[in-house]
Amino acid sequence: MVGDANLSTITINGKETTALNDSGSQVSVVTENLYTKMTPKPDLMSLKEFDLELKAANGTNIP
């Protein structure tokens, strides 16, 4: 089954952006470009703390 992407307009720390909703995801990620535009900056957590292998919705690895 193929349909439209499940997108929503969201606001993170006062910065509005479009997000892909993935109810099965264990983590939420943003681009470095979006992060640099945020004021104040949210705390970052190292993925190494969680020992996770991240993959994008299309199956490619997220470093």
Image: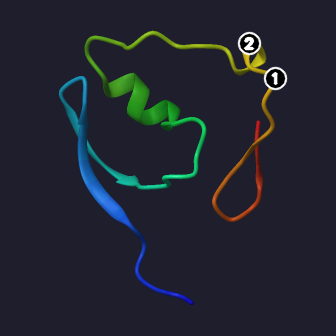
Q: Is residue 60 left or right of residue 35?
A: right
The residue type indicated by label 2 comes to Glu
Q: Quadrant of residue 6?
A: bottom left
- Position in image of residue 12 (x %, y %): 27, 30
> In front here: 47 or 40?
47
Q: Which residue is mark 1?
A: 51
Residue 42: image tag: none
Above or below for 8 versus 30: below
Q: Residue at x 28, y 57 (%)?
A: 8
Helix, strand or loop under label 1: loop
Hey, which quadrant is residue 53 in on the image? top right
Measuring from the top left, give residue 1's x and y in whole percent: 57, 90
Mark 2 and mark 1 residues within 8 Å of each other at the beta carbon: yes
Residue situated furthest left in the rendering: 14
Q: Is residue 10 left or right of residue 50?
A: left
Residue pictured at 53% horizontal, 36% vertical: 29
- The correct choice, above or below, for 55 with respect to 13 in the image is below
Q: Secondary structure at mark 2?
A: helix
Q: Is residue 28 left or right of residue 49?
A: left
**Amino acid on which the number 1 mark rests in the picture:** Asp
Residue 15 picture location, percent across and down = 22, 33
Using residue 34 as the reference point, say whether residue 56 is left or right of it: right
Q: Mark 1 Cα within 10 Å, few/some/many (few <14, many 20+)? A: few
Q: Nearer the viewer, residue 19 or 21?
A: 21
* Residue at numbered disc 2: 49
Q: Residues within 10 Å of mark 2 (few under 14, many from 20)?
A: few
In the image, residue 38 sits, relative to residue 24, either above or below, namely above
